[in-house]
Image (cartoon, rainbow, N blue to C red):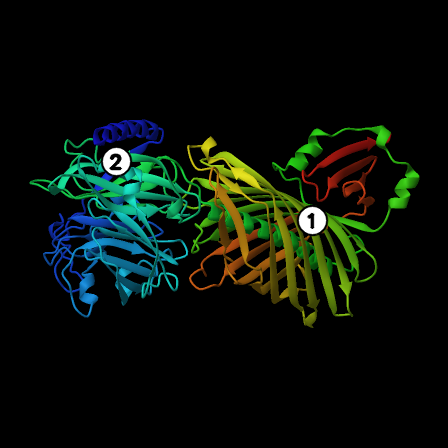
């Protein structure tokens, strides 16, 4: 039976090896950190924390490796017990996750973790780990004792303070944590009987106590194929960033000689639910190969490994024994995130990007409309409030449709009588906006860069001195590039806004906006679309303002409230269409979002310039509080039986918003205005995250006849028609568009007519 089993496993090995070759793992470099005491300049004489001169490099007998989130701090643990090498060693890199850029100077940091204990031990370092945010650091010794530290500066080991010790005992110990820090995973890699134990913690990353929840016997997995005829040791393990996959490093050893090398491999298992190791499903393995140009590439023990933040790089330590053998850390490039055998997707980061883009769609629509309110307030004495921008080249599908459907159809020409009925004091305007945002990594989501572009067309009517009503359509094109990952989320939106100003008295008034949006999200992986989802959105914003005048300075204190509901359809993200990977099914979801804000606006009375221009500076300041409730989303792996629930964090609860701009009016009626708006996120440790928006207009005010009409029919699929007519000398420009609100498949069209009278 042993022979049959061994034959079967050998066959399985070759099958899985052949399939794994579909994803390439390319060795890039290996690192032998130069010793400061023998630097070519002879000037780098460095000392550790205890004042002992550093005479060894960090690659000596490496047990484990870890990186900071930004990839600029490289940390390695050493297993020697001679009093010199049982150390934690941190190096600085000049390029993220590039071992070739390690600094050979005294920026490195070394310490003996056992000197922090009440009773110093002299045991080897087996495993090292950071918490996700880098504020905690963990060291495991050969006795299975876990030592915890607080780091006052994330990922800076020099700012550590010892917390506690947790004794779990065992051999060849390696640890990991769930994404929320509420579970501790311990690998006991002892020969012949390796296990992974799952412990529940009282608080995130709190190792003061732990309760055993589940034990996984690795002999019941494909790792057992390494057990016969040799011995097997499990050395280290890692999760991907979402916890949907686990990777286990194991090696065979020659019977009777635990240090003798035979073969090592990293095994990939996917899970039906994140961090649920009871639901593991074997996907494949990669046989570890060190420097292929080295004649001794097959020599060495890979005690530890780690992935880069993006999952696009793999790092494996290599402890070599024997004369003239040098220990190293090997760096590999992967084809896709965590692509040992199959790619994985970061569902939580994708969902977080979708939420942020949807919230920004509300914010940018309301911000654009409120800029119109401000313009009206500054120009309320003008009879004609038209304000049009110049033509802007864009990929806007609506504008393309307008261009492609240009036609002069006299059959659709309205009678002069109908025109006269539609004539009113409607004013027309448009607005362009460009926004850039940088969002740092949260506890669960990767950092991201967000950019948006928008174009708004609007019309409003003045009913009396202070009352206005209007409507506007905004097209938006947004993208969220997830940092350190070949993945992104992109959004096209079309929004119909209704807005108005209601005066309370001579100095106080309320601005109101109500909007309806259709959303279309695209998921992209390695530049290729892998999935798409539809969305609908309804939102409102109320802004209470009161005006104070101080000479030429007009000050307007204000309070604002935003509330929105967003519906997102179900969809499947087909990663496998881009690279072999785990496809993810996302359920249909609804979520709410809201903000309250208080601040002030200001503007300065018109300043006349000698060349005939009128110049008017303006700006404002707001403190914004995010009052959105908790957002939870359900998703599952294709072929899985369990549902994962991802809770999306509020990126920040407090934000500061400031804007500054000016408006210039020329004698010929042309106007130019620009406004710069900046939002700073003020939560602790994220205050450097920001969003920058530019809004600009270039137009001309004239007295030519303009006409506007809008019809809404709830009985015809909520069909909305908007018609606009502008007279240019002997020509009439007619623009009409239809838009279906709340439709499962949004529909809109447009038509242009140019009619000449000779």
609 up-or-down from 29: above or below: below
Under circle 1, the secondary element is: strand
Front residue of this view, candidates 560 and 415: 560
In this figure, which residue is indicated by the disc labeled 1? 516
Lower position in the chain sequence, tag 1 or tag 2: 2
**Residue, far right:** 417
632 up-or-down from 279: above or below: below
Residue 623 drawn at (x, y percent): 57, 65
458 up-or-down from 660: above or below: above
Indicate left or right for 416 with 271 as reference: right
Front residue of this view, candidates 76 and 675: 76
Residue 121 drawn at (x, y percent): 15, 63
For residue 105, say whether it is visible: no
In this figure, which residue is indicated by the disc labeled 2? 225
Look at 56% across and 46% down and name the residue there: 452
**Quarter the C terminus occupies:** top right
Judge the density around disc 2: few (<14), some (14-19), many (≥20) Cα neighbours within 10 Å.
some
Residue 520 drawn at (x, y percent): 60, 41
Judge the density around disc 1: few (<14), some (14-19), many (≥20) Cα neighbours within 10 Å.
many
Q: Nearer the viewer, mark 1 or mark 2?
A: 2
């Amino acid at each position: 039976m042993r022979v049959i089993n061994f034959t079967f496993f050998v066959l399985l090995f070759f099958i899985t090896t052949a399939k794994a070759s579909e994803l390439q793992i390319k060795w890039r470099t290996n690192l032998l950190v130069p010793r400061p005491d023998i630097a070519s300049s002879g000037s780098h004489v460095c000392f550790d924390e205890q004042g002992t001169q550093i005479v060894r490099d960090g690659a000596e007998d490496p047990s484990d490796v870890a990186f900071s989130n930004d990839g600029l701090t490289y940390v390695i643990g050493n297993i020697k017990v001679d009093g010199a090498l049982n150390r934690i060693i941190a190096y600085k890199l000049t390029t993220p996750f590039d071992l070739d850029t390690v600094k050979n100077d005294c920026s490195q940091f070394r310490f003996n973790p056992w000197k922090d204990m009440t009773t110093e031990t002299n045991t080897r370092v087996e495993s090292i780990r950071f918490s996700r945010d880098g504020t905690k650091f963990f060291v495991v010794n050969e006795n299975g004792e876990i030592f915890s530290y607080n780091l006052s500066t994330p990922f800076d080991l020099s700012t550590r303070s010892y917390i506690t010790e947790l004794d779990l005992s065992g051999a060849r110990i390696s640890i990991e944590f769930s994404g929320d820090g509420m579970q501790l995973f311990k690998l006991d890699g002892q020969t012949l009987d390796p296990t992974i134990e799952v412990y529940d913690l009282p608080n995130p990353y709190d190792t003061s106590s732990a309760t055993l929840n589940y034990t996984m016997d690795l002999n019941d997995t494909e790792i057992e194929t390494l057990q016969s005829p040799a011995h097997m040791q499990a050395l280290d393990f890692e999760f991907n960033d979402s916890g949907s996959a686990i990777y286990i490093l194991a090696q065979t050893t020659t019977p009777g000689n635990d240090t003798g090398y035979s073969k090592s491999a990293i095994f990939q298992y996917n899970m039906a639910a994140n961090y649920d190791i009871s639901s593991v499903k074997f996907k494949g393995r990669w046989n570890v190969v060190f420097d292929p140009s080295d004649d001794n590439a097959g020599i060495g023990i890979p005690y530890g490994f780690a992935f880069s933040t993006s999952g696009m790089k793999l790092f494996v330590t290599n402890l070599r024994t024997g004369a003239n053998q040098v220990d190293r850390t090997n760096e590999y490039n992967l084809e896709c995130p965590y692509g040992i055998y199959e790619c994985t997707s970061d569902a939580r980061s994708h969902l977080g990007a979708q939420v942020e883009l949807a919230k920004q769609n509300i914010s940018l629509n309301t911000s654009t409309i409120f800029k119109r309110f401000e313009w009206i307030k500054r120009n309320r004495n003008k009879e004609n409030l038209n304000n049009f921008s110049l033509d802007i080249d864009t990929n806007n599908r609506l504008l393309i449709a307008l261009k492609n459907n240009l036609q002069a159809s006299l059959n659709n020409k309205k009678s002069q009588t109908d025109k006269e009925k539609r004539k009113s004091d409607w004013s027309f305007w448009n607005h362009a906006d460009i926004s850039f945002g940088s969002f740092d990594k949260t506890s669960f989501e990767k950092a991201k860069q967000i950019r948006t572009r928008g174009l708004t067309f609007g019309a409003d009517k003045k009913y009396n001195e202070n009352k206005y009503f209007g409507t506007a359509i905004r097209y938006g094109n947004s993208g969220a590039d997830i940092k350190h990952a070949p993945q992104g989320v992109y959004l096209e939106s079309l929004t119909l806004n209704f807005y108005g100003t209601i005066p309370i008295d001579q100095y106080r008034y309320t601005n109101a906006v109500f909007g309806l949006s259709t959303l279309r999200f695209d998921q992209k992986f390695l530049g290729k679309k892998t999935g798409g989802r539809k969305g609908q959105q309804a939102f409102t914003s109320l802004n209470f303002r009161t005006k104070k005048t101080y000479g030429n300075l007009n000050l307007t204190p204000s309070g604002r409230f935003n509330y929105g509901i967003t519906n997102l359809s179900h969809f499947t993200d087909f990663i496998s269409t881009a690279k072999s990977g785990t496809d993810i099914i996302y359920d249909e979801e609804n979520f709410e979002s809201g903000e309250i804000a208080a601040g002030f606006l200001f503007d300065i009375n018109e300043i006349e310039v000698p060349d005939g221009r009128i110049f008017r500076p303006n700006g404002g300041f707001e403190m914004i509080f995010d009052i959105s409730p908790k957002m939870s989303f359900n998703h599952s792996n294709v072929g899985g039986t369990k549902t994962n629930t991802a809770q999306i964090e509020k990126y920040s609860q407090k934000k500061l918003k400031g804007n500054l701009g000016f408006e210039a009016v020329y004698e010929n009626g042309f106007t130019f205005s620009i406004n710069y708006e900046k939002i700073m996120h003020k939560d602790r440790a994220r205050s450097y995250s920001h969003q920058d928006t530019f809004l600009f207009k270039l137009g001309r005010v004239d007295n030519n006849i303009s006409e506007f009409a809008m019809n809404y029919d709830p009985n015809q699929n909520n069909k909305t028609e908007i018609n606009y007519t502008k007279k240019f000398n002997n020509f009439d420009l007619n623009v009409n568009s239809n838009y279906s609100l709340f439709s499962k498949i949004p529909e809109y069209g447009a038509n242009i007519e140019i009619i000449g009278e000779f």
